[in-house]
Amino acid sequence: MWVILLLLAWAAAFLTCGRLCLAAAAAGQAPEPAPGGVRLRTLTLYEAAFLAGGPHRVTDLALVTMGRQHRLLLAHTGWATVVDPVGRDELERSVITAIGPEGQSPVPEVRTAHAAADAVRALADRLTAAGLAVPAPARTHMSAAVRQVRGACLLILVTGATAVLLARPGTDQGQVAAWFSLPLLLTGACLAIARIEIHPYTSWASPAGQELLGDLSGGLPRRRLLPSRAATGAAGDEAGLLTALAIKGRKALTDPELRSALAETLRDHRY
């Protein structure tokens, strides 16, 4: 009986790891720019934010930009309140729309609504057409493959425990467990390799986009990063803060209240 369970465990390991390898190979290939797409050599702050952290990073950048200019109030409790209802570009106007007609909304809800905005989709399409962003199908296939390998790990653990319990009297249970450790080792190693080697290419930026972000993170002159219209005219330290937020996310913020305002969950009741 335990041999049948072992074959099931191996089948799950081979199938899921094989799909993960195929998805990784597809995601790791540099996407060709779409016909008619413009090859971008510089990035706006919003483009860098998308490549580094996706739509939610773009939302955070827009919220902080508007908040620093006193056109939006970001409370430490996690609520965003519109002060100036006139956005300076499409992304800011879409943030105001995501906040809602009442002019106040929790930041997590704003992120969710803003991720589906036309302005964010247009930004993603432009970066994908330029070969800098990973196409959405590749990210979806990769995420699904990783979930299946994790499911295979769980299946192997369950079948292995069942096989040990159902082993006939006189059967070496340690030997049975050792046989099941092999497919478990295979799936675990695939997940570890995916985490180390594949993850950077299946987040948001393609290899070309990762190269641009790596140059920026490595301390190259900031002229490589052109500020968006929302950040035009900002002081040097202000531009530096927004650049750090775009590249590194909320962990780059030194203001604890601002970090609390951008937390994933609400800290208090309605502000």
Image (tube, rainbow, N blue to C red):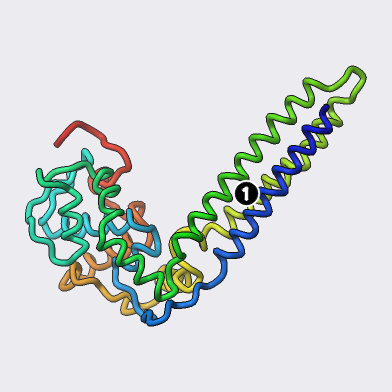
The image quadrant that residue 26 belongs to is bottom right
Of 232 and 208, nearer the camera is 208
Q: Is the C terminus in the top left, top right, bottom left or bottom right quadrant?
A: top left
In the rendered image, the residue lying farthest to the right is 170
| Residue 212 screen position, x and y as percent | 43, 73
Q: Is residue 73 above or below residue 232?
A: above
Of 121 and 65, nearer the camera is 121
| Residue 57 screen position, x and y as percent | 33, 56
Look at label 1 and name its amino acid: Leu
Of 253 and 159, nearer the camera is 159
User: Callout 1: few (<14), some (14-19), or many (20+) C-alpha neighbours within 10 Å?
Assistant: many
Q: Residue at x 25, y 63 (%)?
A: 119
Q: Is residue 137 visible?
A: yes
Q: Is residue 271 above or below residue 115?
A: above
Q: Is the N terminus in the top left, top right, bottom left or bottom right quadrant?
A: top right
Q: Residue at x 22, y 56 (%)?
A: 64
Q: To which residue does mark 1 refer?
A: 191
Is 251 positioned to the left or the right of 238 in the image? right
Of 257 and 138, nearer the camera is 138
Q: Is residue 88 above or below residue 249?
A: below
Q: Residue at x 44, y 60 (%)?
A: 136
The image quadrant that residue 43 belongs to is bottom left
Is 25 positioned to the left or the right of 49 in the image? right
Label 1, secondary structure: give it: helix
Q: Residue at x 24, y 68 (%)?
A: 239
Is 13 positioned to the left or the right of 268 in the image? right
| Residue 141 screen position, x and y as percent | 53, 55
